[in-house]
Image (cartoon, rainbow, N blue to C red):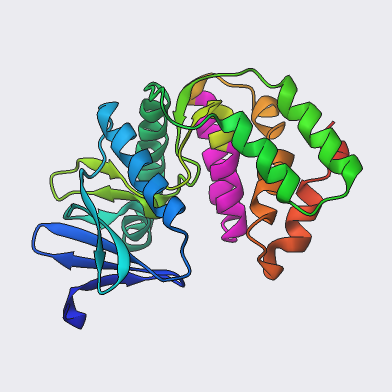
Amino acid sequence: MEKANVLATRADKAILREGDRVIKVFDDNYKKSDILNEALNQARVEESGLPVPRILEVCKMDGKWAIVMDYIEGKTLDQLMQENPDKVQEYLGMFVDLQLEMHSHKAPLLNPLIQKMHRKIGESGLNATTRYELNVRLDSMPRHTKVCHGDYNPSNIIITPQGKPYIIDWSHATQGNASHDAARTYLLFRLAGKDDLAEQYMRLFCEKSDTAKQYVQQWLPIVAASQLVKGKPEEREFLLRWADVVQYE
């Protein structure tokens, strides 16, 4: 493909456009099972009725695995927030409303959140005592079956020129507790250095969902532990503090 068709590049993938299709091409080091799982996640969420791009095919391009889906014209919510700072509150309200709509849907074949978090805690590199405390806390949480995105942030929302939102990037999707998903979003804002926006988001999510802030906060050590698995040195000290269960007691 010509370079003009490249929409974005990441460390391990490239996003290309070909007419009315988007092609996500993965590097050779990306596990085939993870690619197939991402496509399957998105297909299952698509069947739930949520606004997501349709998966068209999974194939190989120049020897690399690729996921082909509908191209959605528009801008990300993150772009709109940067371009229109006076509308951040309006966009944040839209962001939370869409997340709550997502949590109202079910996709029974998605992997259970609880199982994934137990695995992530085990892979976190934390000491045995901390892992035990996190696993006990996780097992004490109410078990729900709501669609959870796992990476819900403004850069994963596309708004069309007509104002319709689409949710993209379903590689981390599970079914589980909505407050975990909210804690994860809060963490992503904080990791991006957007502390004020994180607090505004938390307040708005709790108000709109009628959820106690303290309940969402109980998930913070768990989501911090799961983020440690990514092994980003610049995040490690921050996440280790958050993964300390005692400070949230």
Q: Which residues are magenta?
A: 183-207
The residue shown at (32%, 33%) is 44
Q: Position of residue 222 (x, y in %)?
A: 70, 39
Decide if residue 24 is on the left or right side of residue 1.
right
Q: Position of residue 143 (x, y in %)?
A: 60, 18
> In which quadrant of the rendered view does residue 71 lie?
bottom left
Give the answer, above or below, for where 128 lies relative to 27: above
Give the answer, above or below, for where 148 lies relative to 188: above
For this orientation, the residue located farthest to the right is: 129
The residue shown at (46%, 23%) is 146
Q: Position of residue 163 (x, y in %)?
A: 19, 43
- Any magenta on residue 51? no
Decide if residue 91 is on the left or right side of residue 248.
left
> In which quadrant of the rendered view does residue 164 lie?
top left
Principal SS element in the magenta part? helix
Q: Position of residue 189 (x, y in %)?
A: 55, 52
Give the answer, above or below, for where 2 lies relative to 27: below
**Quadrant location, the C terminus:** top right
